Image: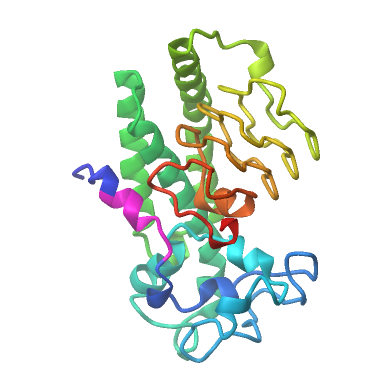
Amino acid sequence: MTMPDLNMLRESLRPDCANCFGLCCVAFHYLKSEDFPINKPAGQPCVHLADSYACNIHSELRERGFKGCTVYDCLGAGQFVSQVTFHGRSWREGEVDGPRMFAIVPIMSQVHELLLYITDILSRDIPEHDARLLETLLEELLSFRELPPEQLTGTALMAFRQQARPLFVRLSQHIRAAGLKLGGLTLTSRHEQDRADLIGRNVTKHDVRGTCYRGALLIGVNLRGQDLSYVDFMGADVRDLDVRGAVLTDSLFLTQMQVNAMNGDRHTRLAPVFTRPSHWL
């Protein structure tokens, strides 16, 4: 298999709602909360989903209490499942296995998340051996997502995640250490904040460059004005994380959905691959 153009692959990991059958509005289960004003069972279309698969209240989602909808980003999984996995056939068509289609959406979203992480790391200066391992994993993932629906299982996905995890951990340390060295700093144990519970903390007085927040709870944390270069955000819960005026241009393992969940402003600096959320303005 020929290695894909990484820029083109990264671009394909953006939602294209016009080519999706409203899958995020049907597949998932939502509980009434501050992010959703209603309960919605998995597999049941949202009451605001139009016959055209568009959202009838898209321009008013936040005002109507659907904050979670404005944060969600499928990383292009929706249109891939719609147009490739199910060959452009909708769950509304009688011969289409709707429940299977809906079950594949979260699996494909995780596949695309892994693809996003790999393209991010391959764009950086990493050891050649690790780059080859990542390229092999990338090829395997791209082949996996082309499989027929019945073979796209969570068990198979778990095997890919287990294969990727030690690579991601090792390369995160490598990239963070190299980045800090450029600033005359050294990576130390204080930079390892895996799964830390920092909810509501104010850490503006600390230099957090190069910190690993993998899987950390950063809900409502104040990082306003901070330089977040080489910070590892993989799997971190960043709802309402205050990044107003912060620098996120060199952050690691950051996704658009995480950016959407943060509280930023026009002074927040993002890498060009990200779209500035409208609610930041």
161 up-or-down from 207: above or below: below
Residue at left 78%, top 65%?
A: 34
Comparing 7 with 270, the one in front is 270
- Where residue 280 sits in the image (x, y, percent)? 58, 56
Task: Name the image colouring.
Answer: rainbow
In the image, which residues are magenta?
8-15
- Where residue 136 sits in the image (x, y, percent)? 32, 35
Residue at left 44%, top 40%?
A: 117
Comparing 257 with 134, the one in front is 257
In the rendered view of the protein, which quadrant contains the N terminus? top left
Q: Is residue 14 magenta?
A: yes
160 up-or-down from 56: above or below: above
Count of numbered circles in the view: 0
SS majority, magenta: helix
Q: Is residue 123 visible?
A: yes
In this rendering, position of residue 238 left or right of residue 18: right
In this rendering, position of residue 50 left or right of residue 250: right
54 up-or-down from 157: above or below: below
Q: Is residue 26 visible?
A: no
Q: Is residue 16 magenta?
A: no
From this viewpoint, which residue is outermost toward the left? Answer: 2
- Where residue 78 sits in the image (x, y, percent)? 46, 67
Comparing 35 with 20, the one in front is 35
Comparing 56 with 165, the one in front is 56
- Where residue 242 sits in the image (x, y, percent)? 68, 43
In the rendered view of the protein, which quadrant contains the C terminus? bottom right
Residue at left 34%, top 57%?
A: 12
Residue at left 64%, top 82%?
A: 46
